[in-house]
Amino acid sequence: MKRHGAIFMDNDSDAKYIIGALLGDAPPEGFHELRAKKGMLFSKLALLHYIDEEMRHGATVLTRNTAQTLRTMSSGEQKKALLAHILENGADYMVLDNPFDNLDLSTQTELKKRLAAIAQHTLLIQLLSRTTDLLPFIRHFYRLDGRELIPIKSIAEISRRIKTFTGSIPPPLSQYSIKENILIQLKNVSVSYFEKPILDRIDWTIKKGEFWELRGSNGSGKTTMLSMITGENPKGYGQELYIFGKLKGSGESIWDIKKRMGYFTPAMTDTFTGYHSIEHMLISGLNDSVGLYITPSEAQLRLAKEWLALIGLWERKDILFHELGTGQKRLVMCARAMIKHPILLILDEPTAGLDDENAALFVALVNKFARESESAIVFVSHRSEPGLTPQYIYELIPGQNGSIGKKQ
Ligand SMILES: Nc1ncnc2c1ncn2[C@@H]1O[C@H](COP(=O)(O)OP(=O)(O)OP(=O)(O)O)[C@@H](O)[C@H]1O
């Protein structure tokens, strides 16, 4: 059996550094056997690189055998394409950076089986932020403290402190008012892409203040569904899709919709490199811009202070956003989406890539906002997040004619 290794990270670990070191010419202590061997990276980052190449230069490295672009594939499809590419090219070892993120349970199980088979002939190094993701055949463990790799004997040495919030959710400067009790309504909505059916006669009603979790396996159409709700998908035209009381295509303003919705997905944080203070980042959530281009008012500064105090960052208010760790960036961006108390808050796989401690903190903030605000929430997740307390679950279940919806 090869000497497979697992490296436990928290959101303060320098993942980029360790990935570079593992794949570079001078591997870190304990990994000297990697020297002069061919390593490949299985990660979201590698996928983003291929998507970027596709968009800029039309390069179709991972999608040579299909007409579909990598960008429009579901997360599961993208990961399968990357794994196939790595296996085709042959590697002596693979660095797996949180390989199960964004994957549904059955795809995770399938990937675990494939990795167990690959492990017979290829050395695997798993980087993981969630302890439950550990591949069962790995026996050698490390903890990544910043850039320092510390060997540990067992997973029990990974201790997570669970923090909570004290204080209340700050009220908005002005509350959006809406007459309708029904915020979003899809009636018999079907969507297909190039003859491939995705959504099959979906009925879903989201009312004021409701807290929903949206579930569904990879490729079941969750992102497609969200793009219908936010009014961005042109396939919404000609269908019975009502957004804030208005039929899609009846002259509704996309800006008016956006103003009253809050949206957060990790891609917004992970690719954001602007030089803004976190205080300004938060206030920008009131103006629907990233960063702040006008002088904030006294009331806005006060509100930002209350939010920063709540999420434990008031002492560091002048720090630049990009200097924060991943978990704190997520909290800031989530608070930024919440600060205006949107009528509907959409969180698209918001805990992907977070370690156990930060995921629990994030979930606690969402639960608290659900309890203390009047906003409706749609939380999309593959993992059943421990502690999340939605009132309702809407599940997309794939079928021959696309996914049907089931309410729980
Ligand atoms: N613009 C498009 N052109 C062609 N196919 C598309 C397009 N957008 C989405 N699809 C396909 O529609 C299906 C549903 O994709 P969608 O991204 O909505 O699924 P999902 O449930 O969000 O998946 P995941 O959880 O993996 O992100 C997938 O098979 C995807 O490949």
Image: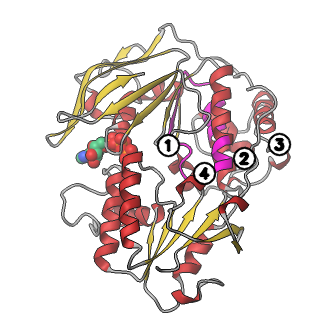
Element under label 2? helix
Between the residue at mark 3 and the residue at mark 4, the CA separation in whole angstroms equals: 22 Å
> What amino acid is labelled 4 in the image?
Leu
- Residue 167 vs 269, above or below: the answer is above
> What amino acid is labelled 1 in the image?
Arg
Quadrant of the rendered image holding ligand 1: top left
Element under label 1? loop
Location of mark 1 (residue): 383
Q: Does label 4 or label 2 sit earlier along the sequence?
A: 2
Element under label 4? loop
Q: Is residue 237 visible?
A: yes
Q: Is residue 215 magenta?
A: no
Location of mark 3 (residue): 314
> What amino acid is labelled 3 in the image?
Trp
Q: Which mark is residue 278?
A: 2
Q: Which residues are magenta?
A: 334-360
The 10 Å Cα crowd at callout 1, few under 14, some 14 to 19, many 20 or more, is some
Between the residue at mark 1 and the residue at mark 3, the CA separation in whole angstroms equals: 31 Å
Place residue 87 in its image quadrant: bottom left
The 10 Å Cα crowd at callout 4, few under 14, some 14 to 19, many 20 or more, is many
Q: Does label 3 or label 4 sit earlier along the sequence?
A: 3
Q: Which mark is residue 228?
A: none
Place residue 301 in its image quadrant: top right
Q: Does label 2 or label 1 sit earlier along the sequence?
A: 2
Q: Which mark is residue 354?
A: 4
Expressed as whole percent of the image width and height from the top left, the position of residue 142 reads 65, 71
Expressed as whole percent of the image width and height from the top left, the position of residue 79 reads 37, 59
Q: Does label 1 or label 3 sit earlier along the sequence?
A: 3
Q: Does label 1 or label 4 sit earlier along the sequence?
A: 4
Q: Quadrant of the C terminus?
A: top left
The 10 Å Cα crowd at callout 2, few under 14, some 14 to 19, many 20 or more, is many
Q: Is residue 292 visible?
A: no
